[in-house]
Amino acid sequence: MTYGRRIIARTIDGSSLDGLILDADSARPLYLQLYDGLRQMILSGAIPGGTRIPSSRVLSESLGVSRFTVVTALDQLVAEGYLSSTRGSGTYVETVPRRDAGKSKVHHEGVVVSDRFEKLVSHRGQALTWRNSLTLNDGSQHLHMASPDHRLFPVHIWSRLTKEVFAEGDFRIVNYREILRPSLLEEQIAKHIAVSRGIRCEPEEVVTTLGAHHAVNLLAELLLNPGDTVAFEEPGMAAIRSIFQSYGCRIEPMHVDASGPDPHTVASRDVKLAFVTAAKQQPMTIGMPMKRKLEMLHWAADRDTLIIEDDLGSEFRYQGGPIPPLKALDQAGQVIYVGAFSMSLLQSLRVGYMIMPRALAEKCRRLIQVRYRALPQFTEQIVGRLIEDGHYARHLHRMRRIYAQRQNQLLDILRSDFADIFEPPEFASGFYNLCYYRDQSIDEDAVLIRCRRNNLGVEQLSYYYANRTSPRKALLVGFAASNEEEIEFATKLLKRCLKPT
């Protein structure tokens, strides 16, 4: 045994303690070192079951440590069942079940362990974890195609509202809320959405969620059975597609043309659910015109199909006024509207919402109560007040102005410095521009790897196709999260990634 810098050979009832290390210079307390060492020796069989442990006085003298150290370590081992102690009889090592070395060897070989756990992953888990390399979304990457600039977050207003909520002393907000009754946030969303998106609804039709992906998961749990058919945009949001696949659904492609997703390209008539991005199709940046919206609604009504409309990026339209979503035209209750504050406030807040028929909203609330409880009341109160007091609308106006300037800067650079690489990109809403390569023979995977190495958050168009192959190769280049200097710097890096020396 090593204690400090001395090596002392000791035994317990004939069992050697060589290998038990006690380091007086370590920041870890000696009783924990002794506990760890004895525990490992019991588990390994170095101290066999049935061995009698000497008294704490004898053991402390033998080991050269205080009696308190020994008693504390032994008491913990007794509490965890490694030792058993009977008054008047002594303390003994419990017999620990152990596998034969030959049988347990398989669990210590890296490759075999990897294979073993791969087999344990469910079909749902496989569907959700198919991609090894993901675009980081932690604000660290330049030109990120899906991240806002969190530096623009109104932190002072948020801090003041936080203090106000706490100062009121209503400590019910720290508990789970009564989920069947609308919250302040749901009431404010109903008012805000009427003005900003032209959707008329009651607070009882609004259901808050932990973001848009959580909303889709809720709807999949509530509405879908294995084998149900889901019409999904092609190309479309791969992460959302994988959610439906994880529930055992059959994905029917809804091909995207110049007007957005075309429902008439869906072969099956037995479609239970359709997922669309109408305000700005992800990833093609197409805004769905009125004619296509009406076609979509009529198609859904004819089949009694529900539509999930993810209004991703609708807040960030930089030319002209807002375009009404599908939900604003829905007269038959066919559309479930999904929105979130991730892009306009903070992604880490995980605040989203759905608007749906009241009967379905009540079912959804009951599901949340059983599976997820609810969004924290504290967060709901603050976001609700942010909207109620007009701070949110002013914050959005400021962000639109700044993001529009950044997009103009990026477009100027792309159209001049990248004219030989990309076709001229168009002005688009949202957070990124879609840039088609002039040379369609380019190795886009190699480009993406170089971009990742240079901390660029761009994405390739092929990622959004079900078969990971796009008819035309393109790159999604973001601008919202990068300021003027960062855009200048990052585009120079991008140029080197596209044309390595």
Image: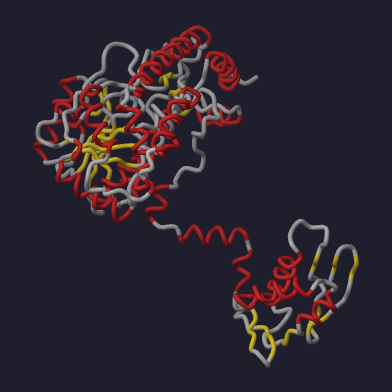
Q: What percent of the width, then of the height, locates residue 394?
A: 36, 18
> Residue 260 occupies which quadrant of the picture?
top left
Q: Is residue 290 left or right of residue 165?
A: left
Judge whether 302 appears above or below 288 on screen: below
* Residue at 41% over, 36% down: 468
> Residue 215 occupies which quadrant of the picture?
top left
Q: What percent of the width, then of the height, locates residue 281?
A: 31, 26
Q: Is residue 43 left or right of residue 397?
A: right
The quadrant of the picture occupied by the N terminus is bottom right
Q: What percent of the width, then of the height, locates residue 391?
A: 36, 23
| Residue 242 appearing in the image | no
The quadrant of the picture occupied by the C terminus is top right
Q: Residue furthest bottom?
A: 88
Total residue callouts: 0
Q: What percent of the width, then of the height, locates residue 438?
A: 45, 16
Q: Is residue 201 left or right of residue 345?
A: left
| Residue 332 appearing in the image | yes
Judge whether 18 appears above or below 285 on screen: below
Judge whether 401 appears above or below 285 on screen: above
Judge whether 232 appears above or below 107 on screen: above
> Residue 433 occupies which quadrant of the picture?
top left
Q: Residue furthest right?
A: 6
* Residue at 47% over, 25% down: 156
Check the image and tell me how it is coloured: secondary structure
Q: Nearer the viewer, residue 197 or 162?
A: 162
